[in-house]
Image: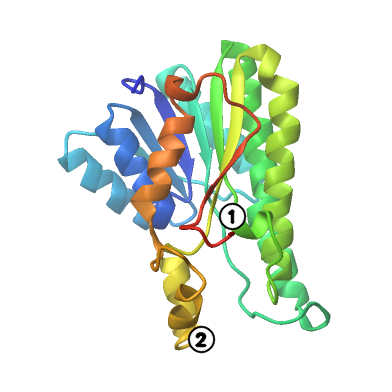
Amino acid sequence: MDLENKVVVITGAGSGIGEACATLFSKNGSTVIIADIDLKKAQTVATKLAEQKGKTLALKMDVTDFNEVESVLQKVVDSYGQIDIMVNNAGIMNQLRAPTAEHTFDDWDSVIAINQTGVFYCLKASLKHMMHQGHGRIVNIASLAGLKASGHNLAYSASKFAVVGMTKSSAMEYAPYNIRINAVCPSYTQTPMLDAVVENQPGIDKKLLRFIPMGRFAEADEIAEAVIWLASDQSKFITGQTITIDGGLSL
């Protein structure tokens, strides 16, 4: 792939899908900026990649703070000259799975702030630099919950539907400027987020697996493979699309 020496920023890259993306971009020769609200986690990933001869930098980024997002991306541009690829991965689940009328304000506010507003902030800040440099590729991590109903999961579902909508709207706006914007929509993936769901609801993993025709959850690196394909020239005429990665669950 044409990812050698590309400058890639990945939010929420301290674990899960973000870490898998960072690892795969690094293996393909990219310079990877691991942005995470938990700097220690980001530094752990950066150290691991550096030990494998990867070019990487760990930075603290709270995606709910636009000034911090803007400052981090400016630091990347000051250090490396540009941002070729932005992967908007940072996200959280509801703390309490409950029907809509019992949904808590705290869950709504925190999930929307990170999963939806955070993506908007990162789009706004990264597009400014991509417009200036005349090119760019953005991949947003949405979810199968952003394409179909997800019960007892209102804030998360709303936020991921929003990510799909932002992907399509911004892709249409910036296609004439050599900037491609796409999204991936994973279903249940082996990450700390899924581990937390299973821990809170013992036995839920066995119930969920019954609905997946392939009979297993996704691995984080399987999602990362789709992300780097969308960020590469192998998909150079694709923009505004959502790729569902769900082992057949949506069928």
Q: How many neighbours does mark 2 have within 10 angstroms: few (below 14), some (14-19), or many (20 or more)?
A: few
Specify whether 251 is left or right of 37. right
The tag earlier along the polypeptide, 1 or 2, is 1
Q: Residue at x 60, y 57 (%)?
A: 144
Tell me the residue at 56%/19% (across/down).
237
The quarter in which the C terminus is drawn is bottom right
Observer-nearest residue: 186 or 108? 186
**Image vertical order of residue 29 relative to residue 155, above or below:** above
| SS for dot 2 | loop
- Calculate the distance from the C-alpha at mark 1 to the C-alpha at mark 2: 20 Å
In the image, residue 60 lies at what x, y percent? 47, 47
Question: In the structure shown, which secondary structural element does the residue marked by tag 1 occupy?
Answer: loop
Name the residue type under label 1.
Ser
Q: Position of residue 186 (x, y in %)?
A: 52, 54
Which residue occupies the foreground of this view, 16 or 224? 224
**Residue placed most toward the observer, 140 or 31:** 140
> Left or right: 58 with respect to 67?
left
Q: Residue furthest bottom?
A: 202
> Height in image: 232 above or below 163?
above
Mark drawn on residue 201: 2
Residue contact between numbered discs 1 and 2, judged by CB atoms under 8 Å: no
Q: In the rendered structure, find residue 143 and report the number of the disc placed on it.
A: 1
Say if residue 233 shows up in the picture: yes
Within-10-Å neighbours for mark 1: few <14, some 14–19, many 20+? many
Name the image colouring.
rainbow
